[in-house]
Image: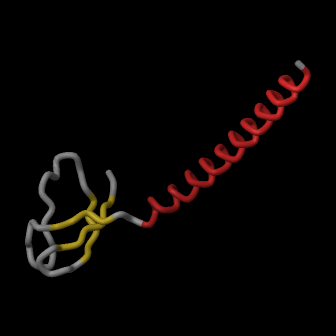
Amino acid sequence: MPIYEYECRDCSGEFERLVRCRDIEVTCPHCQSPQVNRLVSLTHYRHADHWMSNVQNGLKKSLEKDQIKAEMKKTALAGV
């Protein structure tokens, strides 16, 4: 069961809630308002940073392969 962070739209209070599948409505513990927004936790950014470094490494390798292919094509056309 994940723990989510929320911000209340009415009182601007922030809180965390362990959410189960059967929990449909989350209310603010400060003012009991159901008007809450789920926030993005910092752990998501850590995953995004790791993912981004993998994507950048993959793009770098792809660009290197494209350059090698272009050079091979130039060499093949020059030899014809």
Q: Is residue 45 left or right of residue 76?
A: left
Residue with the most extreme top position: 80
For the C terminus, which image quadrant? top right
Question: What residue is rendered at 65% in x and 43% in y?
Answer: 58
Q: Is residue 41 left or right of residue 17?
A: right
Q: Nearer the viewer, residue 37 or 23?
A: 37
Q: Is residue 48 left or right of residue 57?
A: left
Question: What residue is rendered at 57% in x and 54% in y?
Answer: 52
Where is residue 1? Give x, y as percent: 32, 51
Q: Nearer the viewer, residue 36 or 64?
A: 64
Residue 59 lies, with reference to residue 14, above or below; the image says above
Quadrant for residue 36, please give it: bottom left
Q: Nearer the viewer, residue 67 or 27?
A: 67
Q: Nearer the viewer, residue 60 or 1?
A: 60
Where is residue 31? Give x, y as percent: 9, 78
Residue 44 lies, with reference to residue 72, above or below; the image says below
Quadrant for residue 65, please give it: top right
Where is residue 41? Give x, y as percent: 39, 65
Question: What residue is rendered at 68% in x and 39% in y?
Answer: 62
Where is residue 46? Give x, y as percent: 52, 61
Residue with the most extreme right position: 79
